[in-house]
Image: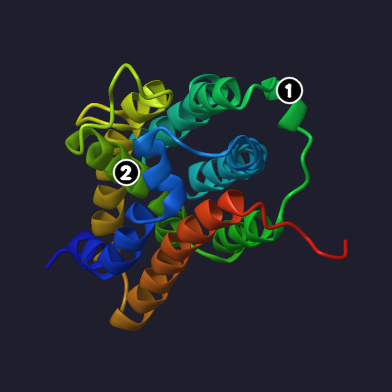
Amino acid sequence: MEFSERLIKKGQPILKQILKHPFVEGIGQGDVSKDALAFYVGQDFNYLNAFMKVYAAAIQKSNSRDQIQLFTNQIEFTLNSEIQPHIDFCKVAGIEYSTVQNDKQAPMTYLYNEHMYNAARTGDLIDVVASMLPCPWTYSVIGETLIEQGSSTESNPFKSWIDFYAGVNSEDKMLSVQLFDILDLEASKYSDEKLKEVEDRFLKSCELEWHFWDQAYYQRDWKFV
């Protein structure tokens, strides 16, 4: 079994819970509260800023020009294209995108970002990729699942969001395949003990994806600070 297959198998229970989350189901049904949408966009803006910095760390740890090109392209994509799903949510919420771009990190956003930063500071390329991969992987599956459920209809206000993440040619789908390939390539260099640590990073990011949706749905913020 390839290392990527092992991770995908281990991540299935968390992925199933993400797909069942009321925020994700609400996207499919075209019904998510404006407060949840606004909170999500503000936090995802924070998260993607961190994500690009972790890509920069991946460039430093890369072993080939192809890898450097991949991560460089993803920084550009995140800067210039991944704002579209944010704009889609803001439109439904009836707010300007600029109004949430100064939101401070909520607890789970902070935890998720620090989890990735830790991999960037202390790990090898395999650690960095494992900590980042659950984001594009879970989003591509969310998009595919919502398409299969028939949610991408003209009457659904989230149709554009769903279409962005769905399909075999979506950026997140293609990126997931490429990142899993990197993990398989790198895995052959490491002991079973090290690969268990990498697996732990991957699964923690999977769980933090669930918490990210949950945090936004219920607008869970700091209580005292």
Give the residue displayed 37% in from the left and 43% down from the top: 139
Q: Say if 159 sits above or below 124 in the image.
A: above
Please state which amino acid type lies under the numbered disc 2.
Ile
Please give the residue where the numbered disc 2 appears in the rendered image. Answer: 142
Q: Report the side of 137 relative to 78 (left or right).
A: left
Q: Report the side of 44 relative to 76 (left or right).
A: right
Please state which amino acid type lies under the numbered disc 1.
Ser
Q: Which numbered disc flags the more N-terminal residue, 1 or 2? A: 1
In percent of width and height, residue 136 lies at: 38, 43
Residue 173 appears in the rendering: yes
**Quadrant in which residue 166 is drawn:** top left
In percent of width and height, residue 70 lies at: 39, 33
In which quadrant of the rendered image does the C terminus lie?
A: bottom right
Q: Look at the numbered discs 1 and 2 and tell me whether their residues touch, using CB distance below 8 Å.
A: no
Mark 1 lies on a secondary structure that is helix
Give the residue displayed 60% in from the left and 25% down from the top: 90
Q: Report the side of 173 relative to 34 (left or right).
A: left
Please give the residue where the numbered disc 1 appears in the rendered image. Answer: 98
In percent of width and height, residue 18 lies at: 38, 56
In which quadrant of the rendered image does the N terminus lie?
A: bottom left
- Distance, label 1 to label 2, CA atoms, is 26 Å
Give the residue displayed 79% in from the left and 35% down from the top: 102
Observer-nearest of 15 and 172: 15
Observer-nearest of 51 and 32: 32
Residue found farthest to the right: 225
Badge 2 local density, few (<14 within 10 Å), some, or many (20+)? many
